[in-house]
Amino acid sequence: MEIIKKASAGTLESSDVYVEIEPGSRGIQLTLDSVVEQQFGQSIRALVQEVLAELGVTDANISIADRGALDCVIRARVETAVMRGKGE
Amino acid sequence: MRRSMLFIPGNTPNLLINGAYLGADALIFDLEDAVSPDEKDSARNLVRNTLKYMDLRGCEAIVRINSIDTDYWKKDLDQIMTQKPDLIMLPKTGCARDVLTADAYMTQVEQRLGYEPNTVRLMPLIETALGVENAFEIASASKRVAAIFLGAEDLTADLRCKRTKGGAEICYARSRMVVAARAADVDVYDTPFTDVNDDEGIRVDAEYAKSLGFTGKASISPRHVGVINEVFSPSQKDIDYAYEVMDAIRLAHEQGRGAIALHGKMIDAPIVARAQQTIAMAEEMGVGKAVQHE
């Protein structure tokens, strides 16, 4: 199942993350803006890729604006954005 | 031991991830009133992931799902029950049929997930005049029901009266709920005190609820949790007396005596039952003799 429409989830409040996803055709194109980019940027990217793989998303453009969210919050917001993007 | 239950909005990460550090015995992750209709899916995912990955540090997990007259409640249960919360809170429960409807679906989900029956218990939230009048049939409708909970804000709207700090308008509902719960042998929880800045008011309100027989009280503010825990805990004097009662009972049995007196007062079955409850709670709180002697 692929992303069929642009969708978002989350907020820009502290401890949250704002995720935007839209249909793509060149694999996963991920952009990250995080207040903890230096310390955790790599692990956030890996987590997002992991969640997308679990949900069967292979082509999408996804942007992440992180405000210090924990892994479980990032995971939840990506899941929601994907579900919305799939029209579920 | 469940003295305090703290409401946590289901779509607010900052509160969800810190809830376990606020001192409450139980956290109520709210998917209902605290979440707007277009964010129900998001809150459901967030609460499920929080339950899966966050350490709740011994806090009980309760999830308030949406009521059974909405399109959300089955989706709530499908997702949330995968993480085995301790309890599901069912809002706007008006009669036994509401409990049985939720119970039947929870049984289906448990079967699908391979859980034992009644792994996840139910706490009906009674917040309508109909619910109050049917409190006993709600409390005794299913073995899944572990407790009932009074919601006074919606109730007073239904009663067409003003909600006051004194609470005279919910006096009947409170008493009826306690009697119904005790008759059905389940726990019973009092409505939150909603003025978060009134530190004296919360104490008076909690003490009144305790005097009526409530097991504990819910809160919408972390500021109230400490007072609620304190009010619904046995005092050191209560604990000492409970051990004295049990010592007197043991001595009387050893001596073959039937009637027992302590400090000039007869010790009968209800006093023993209360002493046992007090000791059980003291030991759970880590202040019982069994703990002190370790």
Image (cartoon, rainbow, N blue to C red):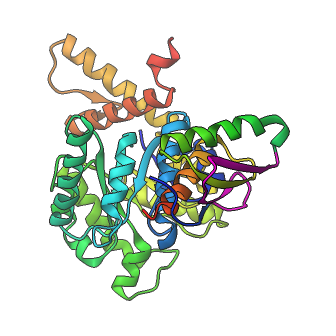
Instruction: Report the label total.
Output: 0
- The residue most toward the right is A38
User: Between B169 and B27, which is closer to the camera in this rendering?
Assistant: B27
Whole-percent x, y for residue B221 in the image = 60, 59
Q: Classify the position of the N terminus of chain B by image quarter.
A: top left
User: Which is more toward the observer, B231 or B192?
Assistant: B192
Q: Does the magenta stretch include residue B127?
A: no
Q: In this view, does B195 lie above or below B208?
A: below
Q: Examine the rendered structure and indicate whether residue B231 appears above or below residue B102.
A: above
Relative to B103, say whether A42 is above or below: above
Q: Position of residue B207 (x, y in %)?
A: 48, 57
Q: Can residue A81 be seen in this view?
A: yes
Q: Is residue A21 a member of the stretch shown in magenta?
A: yes
**Toward which corner of the image does residue A49 lie, by quadrant?**
top right
Q: Which residue is drawn at 38% across and 60% down?
A: B65
Observer able to see residue B9: no
Furthest toward the front, the residue is A25
Counting from the top left corner in percent of width and height, residue A38 is at 85, 38
Residue A43 at what x, y percent from top left?
Answer: 71, 34
User: Quadrant of residue B71 in the image?
Assistant: bottom left
Identified at 58% across, 45% down, the residue is A75
Magenta region? A10-35
Depth check: B118 or B264 in front? B118
Does residue A20 appear to the left or right of B67 in the view shown?
right
Q: Outermost residue, bottom direction? A: B160
Q: A64 or A68, which is in the foreground? A: A64
Left/right of residue A62 with respect to residue B146 in the rendered view: right
